[in-house]
Amino acid sequence: MSGIRPARDPDTWGVFAAAADGRVVVGECSSCRAVLHLPRPYCHRCGSFEVGWRTVAGRGRLWSWTTVHQSIHPAFEAPYTVVVVELDDEPGVRLVGRVPGEPDLEIGMALVARFEPLGGDGDGALVQWDPAEDRRNAWVS
Ligand SMILES: [Zn+2]
Protein backbone atom coordinates (compact mmCIF):
# COMPACT_ATOMS: atom_id res chain seq x y z
CA MET A 1 0.00 0.00 0.00
CA SER A 2 1.50 3.35 -0.95
CA GLY A 3 1.02 6.66 0.77
CA ILE A 4 0.17 5.25 4.20
CA ARG A 5 2.81 5.37 6.94
CA PRO A 6 2.04 4.91 10.62
CA ALA A 7 3.87 7.23 13.00
CA ARG A 8 6.78 5.60 14.77
CA ASP A 9 5.19 6.35 18.09
CA PRO A 10 6.83 4.20 20.80
CA ASP A 11 3.41 3.40 22.26
CA THR A 12 1.96 1.93 19.04
CA TRP A 13 4.82 1.12 16.64
CA GLY A 14 5.09 -2.41 18.07
CA VAL A 15 1.76 -3.29 16.40
CA PHE A 16 3.10 -2.38 12.95
CA ALA A 17 6.55 -3.90 13.53
CA ALA A 18 5.02 -7.20 14.70
CA ALA A 19 2.68 -7.26 11.69
CA ALA A 20 5.72 -6.91 9.41
CA ASP A 21 6.98 -10.04 11.18
CA GLY A 22 3.68 -11.86 10.59
CA ARG A 23 2.36 -11.51 14.13
CA VAL A 24 -0.66 -9.91 15.80
CA VAL A 25 0.16 -8.30 19.15
CA VAL A 26 -1.71 -6.48 21.89
CA GLY A 27 -0.24 -4.16 24.50
CA GLU A 28 0.50 -5.81 27.83
CA CYS A 29 1.57 -4.65 31.27
CA SER A 30 4.89 -6.31 32.14
CA SER A 31 4.04 -6.17 35.87
CA CYS A 32 0.46 -7.43 36.19
CA ARG A 33 -0.07 -8.83 32.65
CA ALA A 34 -3.19 -6.72 31.99
CA VAL A 35 -4.02 -6.25 28.32
CA LEU A 36 -3.57 -2.60 27.34
CA HIS A 37 -5.90 -1.92 24.46
CA LEU A 38 -5.50 0.58 22.97
CA PRO A 39 -1.72 0.41 23.58
CA ARG A 40 -0.49 3.02 26.06
CA PRO A 41 2.68 3.84 27.98
CA TYR A 42 1.31 2.87 31.41
CA CYS A 43 -0.97 0.27 32.94
CA HIS A 44 -4.52 1.37 33.79
CA ARG A 45 -4.75 -1.44 36.37
CA CYS A 46 -1.53 -1.24 38.42
CA GLY A 47 0.02 2.04 37.27
CA SER A 48 3.26 0.47 36.02
CA PHE A 49 5.18 2.11 33.19
CA GLU A 50 6.74 -1.25 32.28
CA VAL A 51 4.73 -2.26 29.22
CA GLY A 52 5.35 -4.53 26.27
CA TRP A 53 3.64 -6.71 23.69
CA ARG A 54 1.82 -10.05 23.84
CA THR A 55 1.60 -12.11 20.66
CA VAL A 56 -1.89 -13.51 20.07
CA ALA A 57 -3.25 -15.91 17.49
CA GLY A 58 -4.25 -14.15 14.30
CA ARG A 59 -7.83 -15.35 14.56
CA GLY A 60 -10.98 -13.55 15.54
CA ARG A 61 -14.72 -13.18 15.11
CA LEU A 62 -16.50 -10.60 13.01
CA TRP A 63 -18.05 -8.12 15.41
CA SER A 64 -19.26 -5.56 12.85
CA TRP A 65 -18.63 -4.37 9.30
CA THR A 66 -19.59 -1.81 6.66
CA THR A 67 -18.83 -1.63 2.94
CA VAL A 68 -17.45 1.56 1.37
CA HIS A 69 -18.57 2.09 -2.23
CA GLN A 70 -16.93 5.46 -2.98
CA SER A 71 -13.17 5.80 -2.70
CA ILE A 72 -12.03 8.74 -0.58
CA HIS A 73 -8.26 8.17 -0.99
CA PRO A 74 -6.19 6.63 -3.80
CA ALA A 75 -4.70 4.15 -1.31
CA PHE A 76 -8.18 2.69 -0.66
CA GLU A 77 -9.75 1.54 -3.90
CA ALA A 78 -13.50 0.99 -3.53
CA PRO A 79 -15.38 -1.14 -2.94
CA TYR A 80 -13.82 -2.38 0.25
CA THR A 81 -15.24 -3.56 3.55
CA VAL A 82 -14.16 -2.23 6.94
CA VAL A 83 -14.36 -4.93 9.58
CA VAL A 84 -14.24 -4.85 13.37
CA VAL A 85 -12.78 -8.12 14.64
CA GLU A 86 -12.85 -9.42 18.22
CA LEU A 87 -9.74 -11.48 18.94
CA ASP A 88 -10.26 -15.14 19.88
CA ASP A 89 -7.40 -14.94 22.41
CA GLU A 90 -8.59 -11.70 24.02
CA PRO A 91 -12.39 -11.31 24.00
CA GLY A 92 -13.21 -7.62 24.30
CA VAL A 93 -10.17 -6.55 22.27
CA ARG A 94 -11.39 -5.44 18.86
CA LEU A 95 -9.22 -4.48 15.92
CA VAL A 96 -10.28 -2.64 12.78
CA GLY A 97 -9.20 -3.92 9.38
CA ARG A 98 -10.10 -3.91 5.73
CA VAL A 99 -11.23 -6.66 3.38
CA PRO A 100 -11.12 -5.98 -0.38
CA GLY A 101 -14.43 -5.92 -2.20
CA GLU A 102 -17.79 -6.94 -0.81
CA PRO A 103 -17.31 -10.37 0.76
CA ASP A 104 -20.19 -12.48 2.02
CA LEU A 105 -19.96 -11.82 5.77
CA GLU A 106 -21.91 -12.83 8.86
CA ILE A 107 -21.59 -11.48 12.39
CA GLY A 108 -19.58 -13.96 14.50
CA MET A 109 -17.92 -15.70 11.58
CA ALA A 110 -14.26 -16.69 11.88
CA LEU A 111 -11.63 -14.40 10.34
CA VAL A 112 -7.88 -14.83 10.01
CA ALA A 113 -5.23 -12.13 9.99
CA ARG A 114 -3.48 -11.12 6.81
CA PHE A 115 -0.41 -8.88 6.91
CA GLU A 116 -0.18 -6.02 4.44
CA PRO A 117 3.34 -4.55 4.06
CA LEU A 118 3.53 -0.77 3.99
CA GLY A 119 6.71 -0.52 1.93
CA GLY A 120 10.23 -1.83 2.23
CA ASP A 121 12.11 -3.30 5.16
CA GLY A 122 11.47 -1.42 8.37
CA ASP A 123 8.29 0.25 7.16
CA GLY A 124 5.96 -1.99 9.14
CA ALA A 125 2.75 -3.64 8.05
CA LEU A 126 -0.97 -3.45 8.73
CA VAL A 127 -3.06 -6.26 10.19
CA GLN A 128 -5.93 -6.96 7.80
CA TRP A 129 -8.48 -9.77 7.88
CA ASP A 130 -9.93 -12.41 5.58
CA PRO A 131 -12.78 -14.87 6.10
CA ALA A 132 -11.40 -18.15 7.51
CA GLU A 133 -11.67 -21.22 5.33
CA ASP A 134 -13.98 -22.94 7.84
CA ARG A 135 -16.08 -19.76 8.35
CA ARG A 136 -17.40 -21.41 11.54
CA ASN A 137 -19.54 -19.05 13.57
CA ALA A 138 -18.91 -19.31 17.32
CA TRP A 139 -21.71 -16.91 18.24
CA VAL A 140 -24.59 -18.67 16.45
CA SER A 141 -25.30 -22.32 17.23
ZN1 LIG B 1 -0.31 -3.56 35.34
Image: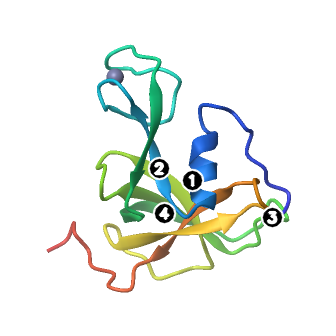
Q: Which residue matches tag 3?
A: 75
Nearer mark to the viewer, of 3 and 2: 2
Residues 94 and 120: in front is 120
Separation of marks 4 and 3 at Cα, in angstroms:
19 Å
| Contact (Cβ within 8 Å) of mark 3 with mark 1 | no
Label 4 secondary element: strand
Please give the count of numbered marks on the rendered protein: 4
Q: Residue furthest bottom?
A: 133
Q: Which residue matches tag 4?
A: 65
Residues 49 and 93: in front is 49
Q: What type is the residue that disc 2 sits on?
A: Val
Which quarter of the rendered picture does the N terminus lie within? Answer: bottom right
Q: What type is the residue that disc 4 sits on?
A: Trp
Separation of marks 3 and 1 at Cα, in angstroms:
22 Å
| Contact (Cβ within 8 Å) of mark 1 with mark 2 | yes
Q: Which mark is residue 133?
A: none
Q: Which residue matches tag 2?
A: 25
Q: Which mark is residue 18?
A: 1
Quadrant of the rendered image holding ligand 1:
top left
Mark closer to the chain start, 3 or 1: 1
Q: How is the image coloured?
A: rainbow
Q: Residue furthest top?
A: 47
Nearer mark to the viewer, of 3 and 1: 1
Q: Residue furthest left?
A: 141
Mark 4 crowd level (few <14, some 14–19, many ≥20, 10 Å Cα): some
Q: Locate residue 125, reporting x and y percent.
A: 66, 58
Label 2 secondary element: strand
Respond yes or no on whether mark 2 lies under 8 Å from ligand 1: no
Separation of marks 3 and 2 at Cα, in angstroms:
24 Å
| Contact (Cβ within 8 Å) of mark 4 with mark 3 | no
60 lies left or right of 102: left
